[in-house]
Each structure stands twice: as C-alpha cells, then as structure tokens.
Image (cartoon, rainbow, N blue to C red):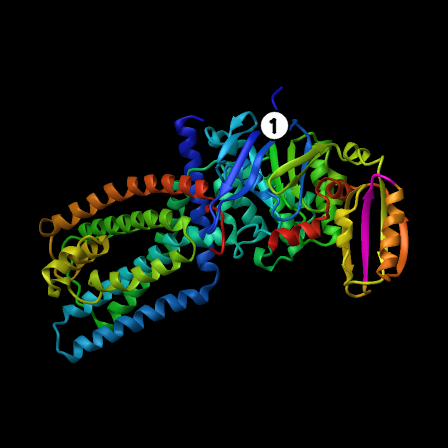
Amino acid sequence: MQYSVETQDVVRIFKAHDKPVTALDKVSISIREGEIFGLLGPNGAGKTTLIKILTTLLLPTKGEAYVGGFSVVKESEKVRKIINLVSGGETPGYGILTASENLWFFSQLYGLSFSAAKEKTKQLMKDLDFEEYAKTRMSKLSTGYKQRLNLARGLINDPKILFLDEPTLGLDVLTSKKMRGYIVDWAKREKKGTVLLTTHYMAEADEMCDRVAIIDRGRILAWDSPLKLKENLKENVIMKIEVSSVQADFGFLEKMVGLAGCSQTRSIQTDTTTLKVIARDEQVLSVITAKLEEQKLKILGVNKAEPTLEDVYISLVGRGFEEQEAHVSA
Amino acid sequence: MSVREQLIHDLKVAYARLWVRIKGGNREPEWLAAELIIPILTLSAYIYIYKMLNAPAEFAGFVVIGGTMLAFWVNVLWNMSAQFYWEKETGILGVYFVAPISRMAILLGMALGGIVNTTLRAAMILIVGTLIFQVPIVVYEPLTAILVFFLTIIALYALGMLFASLFMMYGREAWHTASLLQEPVYFLSGSYFPTKFLPFIVQILASLIPLTLGLDGIRKVVIQGERITNIWLNVVSLVIFILILMPLAKFTLNYMENLSKKEGRLTLRWQ
C-alpha cells in the first residue's frame, strides 16, 4: 500500500554549541490518503522539525521520508508540486499588498492562469469568510484574518497533501473553530486531500484527527485513533484533585507505585493546584489523599474524569505538557 | 513538465515577483521623495566642492552620473542582496522554498522589479541634477551609452543575485556585510570622482567591481563624447562579468540552499 506520507527511521540531529541535539529519533509514521493525521506533543518535541523535513525545507540526518510516493531528498521537485504548508503565527505574505493581491501572487508560484487565479482567490476568500477584507492591506488585518489568509494561501494550489504546523496558534476560540471546521470540510466532505497537522492543543487533535501520533523529545510514543488511544486508558482511574496551595511540593507522586502518571496545574489567582492523576489501581488514590493530608494541605475537591488525549500523553510520559515544556526549556 | 512549460512557469513567477516589487515600491510615495532628494543633496555637496576648487565643468557631469548609478548599487545591495534575508525573517522564504519554482526565477523577478523602480528614480536624479547644475552632455553614440548602461545594470544585478544566495543562509551577518560593502564600493567605483586619480593598484582592484567599469564607460560616452571604439574594453569586461556572475549565482544558490537544509538554517530566524 502506498501511503500519502511515510517516514522510515527518520533521525535529525542539530549541531549545538555544547553537544549535538537529537530533534527526531527514528521516527516512523505512515499516513493514508484522505486522512487527517495529528502530531501531538509539547513545544520542542520535534513536530516542526518533522514537518520541515516532509516539506523539503530540511534534510534528515538519517532515514527515509516519502510524500506522495516521492522521496523528499531525491525527488523534492515532485514533492513540492503536490504539497503546501501553513504555519500558525506566520506572516501570510507582503504587508504592503492587499489580501487578494497576496493570494494572486502566491497563485503564480503554482502557475495558475490569470482567470483561474482570480476565481480561486475569490472562492477561498468567500469560503474562509474574509471577502470584505479583499482590498485591505495584509499589514492591517487582525491576527485571525491574517491566519485565514495564510490558510487560503496554503489551499491556493489544491494540494494533495496539506501540512499544517500549529494552524490555530494564538487565535481566538471562534476563529480557531472556524478554521478547524473548514480544514475538516476541505479534507473530508470534499475528499480533497491528506492533512498532517501538528498541534499542542489536545482538543484540536481530538476533534479533527482520524489518527494521532504522540511525539515527545523526538520520539513517537504511540499512534492510533484518538478513541483507541483513550480506550487504552479505560482500565486506569483518572482523578482530578484540587488542593489549596500553589506552592506545595508534590514530588512524592513521582515515586509512587501504581501511578501511571500525573500532571499539576497551578493557579496563582486562586492559590490552588489541580492534580490530575492516572492510577492503575484505585487504592493509590487513598494513599495520595493521605499524603496530602500529612502535608496539611486542604483537599478542595476530587472528581473522576473521562480519559482525554492529555491523559494519554501523561500516561506515556509521566507528566503533563506544561511541565514537559518547562523541563525542556530548563 | 516540458522545457516550454517550465519556461512559461518561471516567467510567470518572475513576473509575479517583479509585480510585487513595483507595486510595493510605489505604494508609499514618501519613499520616492526621500530617494530623490537625498542623492541630489549628496551630489550637490560634491559639485559645490569642485566648483569651489575651480575644477573643469565636466566634473559636475561625473558627479551627476555617479549619483545616478549609485541608486542602482544601493538597490542591488539592500533590495536585492539582502532580500532573501528579509524574506527569511518575515517567513516568506519558507513559502518560496516549499513551492515548485526555480529560485532563479524569484531572483530574476526581484532584479527586474528593482531595475524598473530604480531606473525611474535614477532618471529623475539624472534629469534634476543635469538641469540644476547645467551639466554639459556630449553624446555622439546614444546607443553605445544605452548598451553600456544595460550591461552595467545586468552585471550589477547578477552580482546582487550572487550575494542574495550568500545572504540567504546567514542572519544578521547579512545586514553587516551589506553595510560593509556599501561605502568601499562608493569610493572604489569612483562614484563622485574619476578613478584615474587613484593609485594604480587600487585602480586594478576597483576594476573588479562592475560598477567601476560601467561608470567609466558611461561617463566617457555621455560627458566626453567618446565612441564605442574607445570603450570596447569596458564593454567586453562587463560581458565577461555577466557570463561569470550569472552561472556562479545559480551554482551558489543551489549550493547554499542545500547547505542551509543540511545545517537547518534555511528558515531559522533571529540568528
């Protein structure tokens, strides 16, 4: 079976001042045609590095990668004809040109005729609901409209495979929802293409993706449909425990037997910490509450939770995204 | 894709990039005023110094033509050579390199757009400078003047293409390198004085800059009324420059693109 995207033991090592940094460590994934595939991981996990390799912007140190059946190293010209890339938070064009002028310019990079470019530009602006800003200079557009323009640019050539790198980064809830809806429509209802999406928003991956790969420190830890990934946690007990301290030390959780993982969300405003614990055994929870009481911490609430993709990540890595990002930056 | 289709695609890309440059360059007219007034002020200073020293009247012509051609050098340096650096900083370079296009087509578009915009500005500097300072113009062979002008421009922009590929990989170094190149070329090319007054070894070094040869040729034809038989060496040298710089720019661009992808610097910003 030929996959739309396939990588085999891709390794990428960057030279750093003190020692080499392995951004991708033997990454092997395969994405089927028409699939929306999510790469989920914290900042610094290697998501963007993988996207850059697949879009021919970066060479792998080792391993093979194919897009549309073409090698990204040896047949990069053929790869570029069938792909496009949209990165969240990027400038979607030249600030001095209007939205429609920018789209026309990018259409020319893909060889569209004058009439086809005009039609396509109009259609995309209509579909993404920013026709009224067609004659507004890009520099004067709000972040949300800039990102709509960016997505329109990514679709201008009707790519067979669309790469989206954090496409809703920094967008408000409504714009994010609109963008997600449009991407799913584009890929599914119109059966247009394959999408590889990177995100660190769990809900986004859950809502949009047919399958998700969880990536951490350059390694793929698990990949399957969001439902199946969550089902794997069914035998665990997931609890949210709210504690009345923002400064308490929860280091004891790391050594606790029977705990698949835990995350901490601290709120300075309410002076509370919410612990999310994934326990293999319900009895572990009573040990945790006893330990908290020992530290004279007030337990404000204990709630059972349904598994989410975040819990899948916590169970695989042992901690949550935010702690992982803090760990990476430290 | 056949060769013909590829060529049409490349020309479309070049035209689109040219269009962006012209549209963008003329959308903010305040820049036009600055680009016209500042060179006129600079060349006025030199002309008044020459007048004060009772230099021959043709020196004013030297300065006006030098000032006119410098507009192209500034454009080549800041809007051509350093352009890929700016495109990298704004994220557009990544879009170019993901698209199925010839990088040379993009550079060609940038160069042509730069030539069109700068020719308009340079023509204004030439006309205003000539009228204000009553520069004596003696042209017997206007076609030769046009030929030398275009050869100079092509050689200059080919040099710009070469620099663009070098600057593409680098970060802030590109900015510093452009600054470092600006003033020495002003001096060595003899923009405001004839290079024959420079020491011989410096003249040899200066002749490695296409602008020096072009300026010298244009001045001889336009101010001193010389003919192609007297400036054939300038013409041949400029053609040689073009024949070397164009393929070298293409080779360097491919090499730097590959190296950037290897080192992960193609889209790395704020270096």
Q: Residue at x 69, y 39 (%)?
A: A183
Residue B121 place in picture, x, y as percent: 35, 61
Residue segment shown in magenta: A272-281
Answer left or right for B53 relative to B177: left
Q: Nearer the viewer, residue A64 or B36?
A: A64
Do we see residue A199 in this rendering? yes
Q: Is residue A280 magenta?
A: yes
Q: Relative to residue B40, is residue A212 drawn left or right? A: right
Give the residue at mark 1: A4
If the image is split into quadrants, where does the C terminus of chain A sit? bottom right
Magenta segment: does it hold B225?
no
A303 displayed left or right of B103 = right
What is the chain letter for disc 1? A
**Residue A169 point in image, percent of width and height:** 66, 51
Amino acid type, residue under disc 1 in the picture: Ser
Question: In which quadrant will I find the N terminus of chain A?
Answer: top right
